[in-house]
Image (spheres, grey):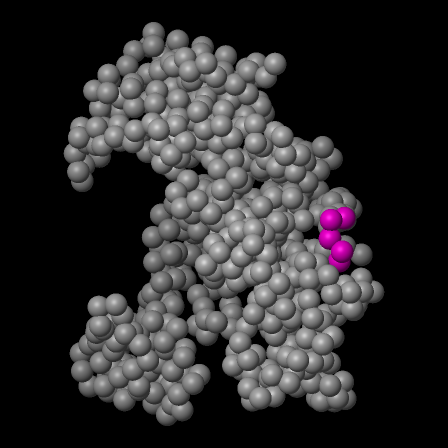
Amino acid sequence: MEKFIAFDTETTGLDVLRDDYMFAFSLCDDDGNLEVFRVDKSKREKDKAVKRMNEVFSGKYTVVMFNAKFDIHVAEKFLGRRVRHVPFCDVYIMSKYLQNDHPDHRLKTLAWELGDISTEDEEEIKKYLTPGKKKGYEHVPRLRMDRYASLDSLRTMILHLFWWPMIKKNKNLSRLFNMEMDVIRLTLDMENRGLMLDRRESENLVIRLEQECQEISNKIVEKCGRNINVYKGDDIAWLLFDWCSLPVVSFTPTGKKKVSKDVLLYLKEEHKCTEKQVWFIDSILKLKSYDRGIKIIRDNYLQLVDENDIIHPSINTCAAITLRQSCNNPNLQNVAKEGVLLNPFPVPARRCFRPRVGYINGHVDYSGIELKLLVHYSQDKIMVDHINNGGDPHDFAAQLFYGEKYTECKDPDLKKSLRGAAKNANFGIPYGCSFKKLAKILGVSEKEAKVKFERYGEVLPNLAFLTRILSKEVKQSGYVETVFGNRLYVSREKPYVGTNYLIQGTAAIVLKEAERRFYQYVKENVEDGVCNVLLPIHDEIVFEWARASLPEMKEHLRNIRELMIDFPEFSVPLEVEFTITTTNWQKKKDYSLN
């Protein structure tokens, strides 16, 4: 019979990959017996704690934790060895799968709701902390702290006993939960390994951006003839709406004129601006972008690197309401790149990341996965067959929208532009975009957009009305269900977001399963240290490969590709694309497996 024991740590802070450490831990078995161990008071107590923790992570128990990745990091740092291989359960992940729409997945909140355990112990502890001073929980009187620690392991066990039977009895949930535990294990490796920052390039980029910001600021002051603070909202509002005579678009909740990026882009696109107005709008947009980029690179990347120029980000394996992953300290899921339409003045932050010495960096990205998932869930046979026969879905849409204007077009640039517009419409329509938005996407009048939508809907009705179809299901059941068998609960008041939940939730599982397969293949087939999985980014996995073993890389990547696209659950095939770089992420190039 499986034996469970809840394990919870108390630390000096949350940055255990760097300076913070454990000072106590608590245990609770499935009969409710509690134990608390301090490791910072005496050698005798520490030795006793080490012995007990080694027993807990010996494999005789399934260790139950809340946010297991954190507690495993802490335990491994304390013991000086790996324990991630032992059986464990993460109650936080159970909560995310069983009630993804819950507004608060914190341990104390959940245990109060399900186990009626008061949350007042947190307030009791805070009485002993000095606001604004670094006096942590390790300084709280022991009796108070021991009670506080033991309650957290009790909470963890109670939630586990309530949710574990629900997970086990559902074959789909049980399989997905096991996958999530494997993803936690490989994420621990990713966080420990980290990514290399090009310190010199990062520092030089900050200097260049600061110099350009200063030049732009000086020119603005010179042109408007007034010494203004170009980073202050009120001064920007004066510059744009008084000096430049641009119309006010909207106001903040406090009644001030909004000068956000969205407002500036709207003015530039929708208002017939003079050359002077465009220059001032672009200057403010550039300052906003560069100032944000400077802060990210200087205050995040450069502040968080270790002595070897390695950044160890914190990856939340099940963050969003759709179960997608996230990254913080720093956020590497949104590293800015050049050539982005929605940001005309991007900071080339991808130049800041480079391969380790002796390695190249590789990126493997699911190509067109969002549209393929939309097509799968719509089950529009024409588009399913078109994709399965190797056809281009956006070319198909362009023919529907533009007819001979597209098929007979001899201008390659115009044809590319029309296909691009059709691609955007192919995404917008299934999500329920309005005729006004469709008209803007296709570059036609709203009347024409309605005709084109009707044509699209006649040929691909399920895709055209996917949001409407799913909204009806959400109103009836309160959830959407992925092809993998897990439910994502959606507010009946906003049923239209069900489409987004379904697509994003499915893509999240695809990527995590792909990570698991990639990682397992490398462990079983590639010499230790040759390849390391480094980071998930939306629908992409970043990895590194040792230069000395490059002759064998292509064959291994072919096998990894097969594993990553092997999802018979879908009616259309998935595909991945590889890119590699020997310099920095911005300069990555396509890598053919042929």
User: Residue 125 in the image: x percent, y percent?
Assistant: 23, 28
Nearer to us in this view, 412 or 324: 324
**Residue 580: quadrant of the picture:** bottom right
Q: Left or right: 146 with respect to 355?
A: left
User: Residue 3 in the image: x percent, y percent?
Assistant: 55, 15
Look at 44% across and 51% down and name the residue there: 331
Look at 73% across and 53% down and name the residue there: 570
Q: Left or right: 42 with respect to 205?
A: left
- Most prominent secondary structure in the magenta stretch? loop
Res. 100 in view: yes
Q: Left or right: 302 with respect to 584?
A: left
Nearer to us in this view, 84 or 247: 247
Judged from this view, the residue extending furthest toward the top is: 44
Q: How many marks?
A: 0
- Residue interval drawn in magenta: 568-572
Judged from this view, the residue extending furthest toward the right is: 389
Look at 80% across and 56% down and name the residue there: 594
Judge whether 234 appears above or below 152 on screen. Answer: below
Q: Left or right: 243 with respect to 272?
A: left
Res. 324 in view: no
Nearer to us in this view, 303 or 319: 319
**Residue 411: quadrant of the picture:** bottom right
Judge whether 84 appears above or below 414 on screen. Answer: above
